[in-house]
């Protein structure tokens, strides 16, 4: 039985397919762990091909499993994975949940390993799909958390997304700035002071959440 069929069988056993009964993400990840352990070939190329087949099903649990599989082979990543991941982002992601799950794990890990690949994110800020624009910011969060913000320069993404019309994109780059503020509080404080008249309120408030009381007071004046 191939992996897609096995995944369907496991999901049916917990009432997920085809009835649509809600199952927690943790339950789907448990199934993913079991399926991954059963793979006879865990080479990156084979796993990525399995991921593609799972993603072609275009259902939420299959996406969770595919992105989990991709993250599990992170020690085998090379720069060529960027084109594969970008294709998945364009072809199969369709909302903020898919975007965040993929970008804060597998895709974000790739950027951590190869920070210079972040140059390729800038074109996403001009895409029509809001999840592509959100991804440009969210995918940098793992690198920021691991102290690689100097190499990925998240402020250039914030500049490009500053006046984005979509609320979820504004929240996305605000979240990125909030994480950056935990590493570089003065840098983000200065950035917010510079742009506080122009930045949309939802992004501004997300960005300042982790700052000290005095900094927040000054910013809100």
Image (cartoon, rainbow, N blue to C red):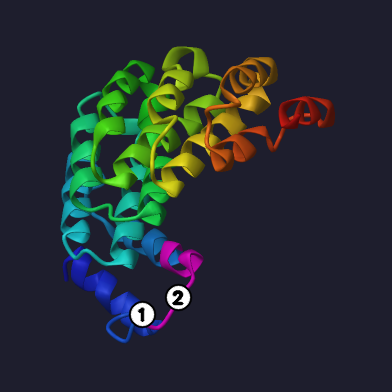
In this view, the residue farthest toward the right is 214
Give the quarter of the image for residue 181: top right
99 to 195, vertically: above or below: below
Q: Is residue 114 left or right of residue 174?
A: left
221 to 156, vertically: above or below: below
Q: Position of residue 125 (x, y in %)?
A: 31, 31
For image coordinates 83% across by 32% down, the residue present is: 213
Q: Position of residue 116 (x, y in %)?
A: 34, 15
Earlier along the polypeptide chain: callout 1 or callout 2? 1
The residue to which callout 2 is attached is 23
28 inside magenta stretch: yes
Give the quarter of the image for residue 2: bottom left
Label 1: element kind: loop
Mark 1 nearby-residue class (10 Å; few <14, some 14–19, many ≥20)? some
Whole-number angstrom distance, CA of label 1 to CA of label 2: 6 Å
For image coordinates 25% across by 71% down, the residue present is: 6
Mark 2 nearby-residue class (10 Å; few <14, some 14–19, many ≥20)? few
Marking on residue 211? none
175 inside magenta stretch: no
Q: Is residue 45 left or right of residue 20?
A: left
Q: Nearer the viewer, residue 181 or 57?
A: 181
Label 2: element kind: loop
For image coordinates 64% across by 20% down, the residue present is: 193
Give the quarter of the image for residue 126: top left
Q: Nearer the viewer, residue 3 or 105?
A: 105
Q: Which residues are magenta?
A: 21-29
Marking on residue 16? 1
Q: Nearer the viewer, residue 190 or 2?
A: 190
Label 2 near label 1: C-beta < 8 Å?
yes
């Amino acid at each position: 039985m191939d992996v897609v069929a096995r995944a369907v069988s496991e999901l049916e056993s917990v009432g997920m397919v085809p009835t649509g009964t809600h199952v927690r993400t943790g339950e789907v990840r448990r199934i993913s762990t079991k399926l991954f352990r059963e793979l006879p070939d865990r080479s990156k190329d084979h796993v990525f091909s399995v991921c593609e087949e799972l993603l072609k099903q275009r259902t939420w649990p299959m996406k969770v499993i595919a992105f989990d599989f991709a993250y599990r082979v992170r020690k085998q990543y090379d720069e060529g994975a960027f084109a594969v991941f970008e294709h998945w982002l364009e072809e199969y992601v369709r909302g903020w949940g898919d975007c965040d799950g993929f970008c804060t794990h597998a895709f974000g890990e790739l950027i951590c390993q190869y920070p210079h690949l972040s140059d390729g994110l800038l074109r996403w800020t001009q895409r029509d799909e809001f999840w592509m624009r959100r991804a440009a910011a969210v995918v940098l969060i793992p690198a920021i958390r691991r102290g690689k913000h100097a190499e990925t320069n998240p402020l250039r993404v914030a500049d490009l997304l500053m006046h984005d019309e979509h609320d979820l994109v504004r929240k996305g780059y605000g979240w990125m700035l909030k994480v950056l503020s935990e590493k570089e509080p003065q840098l983000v404080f200065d950035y917010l002071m510079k742009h506080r008249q122009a930045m949309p309120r939802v992004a501004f408030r997300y960005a300042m959440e982790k700052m000290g009381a005095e900094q927040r007071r000054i910013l809100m004046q």
